[in-house]
Image (spheres, rainbow, N blue to C red):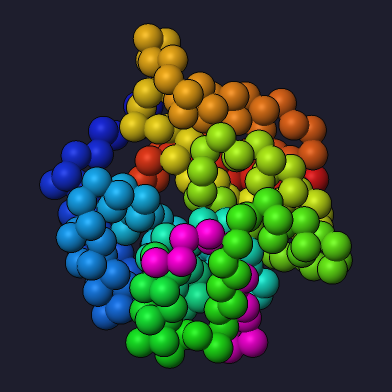
Amino acid sequence: MGLNLTVNKEIEEYINNNSIKLHPVQKEIIKHNERLGDIKRMQISISQCHFLHLLIKSSKIKKILEVGTFTGLSTLSMSLALPEDGSVIALDKNQKTSKTAVNFFKKADQENKIKLIIAPALESLNNLKDHKQKFDLIFIDADKENYINYFNHSVDLIDKDGLILVDNVLWHGEVVDNSKQDRLTVSIREFNNYVNEDKRVENLIIPLGDGLTVCRKL
């Protein structure tokens, strides 16, 4: 039985150097986030940027919903992969980081594809459902305690074969450490179990970044 390779920093750098080249504004966001201290962990990994790009291109995705935007790296990565008539609706409640994200979107000439809604995500998700909105792909990377709620809303907002992606599902490896019983780790474990038992989707956890769940609606 083959074993998965343990990816250290040197291998990760090698992978990134031999993968899709980042847009200059993607690089700028990464540099900006490096100066933010501990909250920079909210950024997706470079490998996830590449994965989102290829998934969106190959699946001919046109309508995307994002739950949790931070400073805009994931949003921009998805927008850049979309066709000219594609769109991203991004949800975030943080005024400060959202303002930073919008500036990056404008700098990359992507503001015409991206609509950022600054409000509590559950409120925005309810409004989108009320307006019968549908999406091809939904990317969830927000507060972990609400992951199950975000997921359930997302299942209603996509049609058959639609995709739901969820970040941080391996939680620094702590999901397999039974001595870790803090609120966030427990929330992630409960979410992973919930999705795995949900008959509305089929799912796969990919060890990209901090763990990425990919679900297809059945």
What is the x, y in percent for residue 10? 13, 47
* Between 108 and 98, the one nearer to me in the picture: 98
Q: Quadrant of residue 99?
A: bottom left
Q: Residue at x 84, y 68 (%)?
A: 131
Where is the C terminus found, in terms of image quarters?
A: top right
Name the residue at the left extreme. Answer: 10
Is residue 77 a member of the stretch shown in magenta? no
What is the x, y in percent for residue 66? 58, 61
Is 182 placed above or below 83 here? above
Where is the N terminus found, in terms of image quarters?
A: top left
Is 127 placed above or below 11 here? below
* Between 21 and 183, the one nearer to me in the picture: 183
Q: Is residue 79 left or right of residue 30?
A: right
Residue 216 seen in render? yes
* Between 139 and 149, the one nearer to me in the picture: 149
What is the x, y in percent for residue 45? 33, 53
Q: Residue at x 50, y 50 (%)?
A: 141
Residue 162 seen in render? no
Q: Which residues are magenta?
A: 81-96
Is 85 placed above or below 213 here? below
What is the x, y in percent for residue 185? 45, 25
Q: Is residue 11 left or right of residue 42?
A: left
Q: Residue at x 69, y 60 (%)?
A: 124
Q: Residue at x 55, y 88 (%)?
A: 112
